[in-house]
Image (cartoon, grey):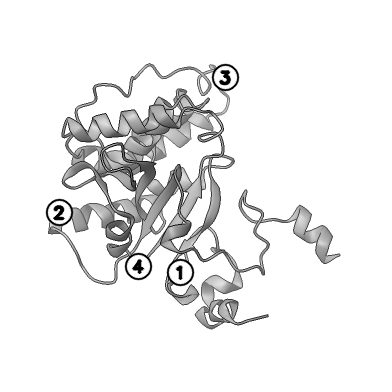
Amino acid sequence: MDTLLRETDQRMTGGLWIGDPPTRLRLEDLTEGMLVFGVGTSEQRGPKTAQKIRALIEYGSSGPYVHVGIILLDSETGCLKVFEAGASGVQACSLDTFLGRYRYIAAYEQPALLPSGSIEAARRFARRTVDVKTPYSRLGALLAPLRQWRHQRRVWKWPDNDPTWSSRRHGATPHGRRHYFCSQFVIDTIRAAGVHGFETNFLKSTCYTPMMLAESPGLLRFIGFVAERYEVLDPRDPVIAGTVYARHPHLRAKWAEPS
C-alpha cells in the first residue's frame, strides 16, 4: 500500500513523498541550468529600500521565496556563477556569495533547458545583459505581485472568449530591455535559450514573482535545499507547506538522523 501511495500521491514534480526528507545539497552539487531561490536572511542586510522590496514581494506572493537567479557557466572566468537581477543591476556572483545572503536556498531545474542544446544561448544572453550594465527594475519588482494577480485572473478566466490567448506569443522581446527584476530576468534567459512555452502569454516574465515561478505546475522540478539544517526551512516553503513537518521543526530535525 505504501508503494502505491508513493506512486500516486507524490509532492511536487520531483516525486517527493510526504514522509521523505528533501535532499540536502552542498554548493558543489549545484550544476549549470539550476534555478536557485533565496529564502529569508539570518540578519537584515542591504539597503532599506531593498529590504522593503523583498518584504513586499514576500507578502504579495504569500511565500518565502524572495529572489531567484540562474546558474550558468561564465565565459569570462570559466566558472559557474549565479546570474541575477539584484538591487545593483544584473550581475554574476559566486555561489558562495549568493548563499551568504540567505538563510537557505532552494534549487530547482527546468528539465528542457539542458536537453534543448541551447544552454550556450542562455549563457550569451545572460553575459550580454551583465556587460551592458542593465539596471534593476525596482518598479517592476514592486508591481510584480499585482501583475501576478491580474495575470492569474486572465489565465483562469471563465468563460474565456479567447481560449488561445495563453498559448500565443506575447510579443515582447527579451533583447534590448532597459531594466530587469529577478524572476523576469531568469524567465527571459530561459526564453533566450529557446525553451518551448517561455515565449507565450502564459509565461509573460513581467507577471511572475519568484514564488509563482517555483510553484507553477509542471514548469520546474525541485532538486533540493542548500541548508545547514532541516530546521531552518520556512514552514511556507512549497516543498513542505501543508504537512506536519511544516508545523513541527523537531520532526524535520529527525530527517537528519540515520535511518
From the viewer's perspective, is the residue at label 2 or at label 3 nearer? Answer: 2
Is residue 80 visible to the viewer in this orientation of the structure? yes
Mark 3 element type: loop
Mark 2 element type: helix
Which label was assigned to residue 213? Answer: none
Residue type at mark 1: give it: Leu
Counting residues from the start of the chain, the first of labels 4 and 2 encountered is 2
From the viewer's perspective, is the residue at label 1 or at label 3 nearer? Answer: 1
Residue designated by label 2: 49
- The one of 185 and 54 positioned closer to us in this rendering: 185
Residue designated by label 3: 163
Counting residues from the start of the chain, the first of labels 3 and 4 encountered is 4
Mark 1 element type: loop
Q: In this view, does 259 lie to the left or right of 52?
A: right
- The one of 229 and 81 positioned closer to us in this rendering: 81
Which label was assigned to residue 103? Answer: 4
Q: Give the percent coordinates (x, y) of residue 133.
A: 16, 34
User: How would you rate the neighbour count of disc 1 (Cα within 10 Å): few for under 14, some for 14-19, many for 20 or more?
Assistant: many
Counting residues from the start of the chain, the first of labels 2 and 3 encountered is 2
User: How would you rate the neighbour count of disc 3 (Cα within 10 Å): few for under 14, some for 14-19, many for 20 or more?
Assistant: few
Residue type at mark 4: give it: Arg
Vertical placement of residue 184 versus 242, above or below: above
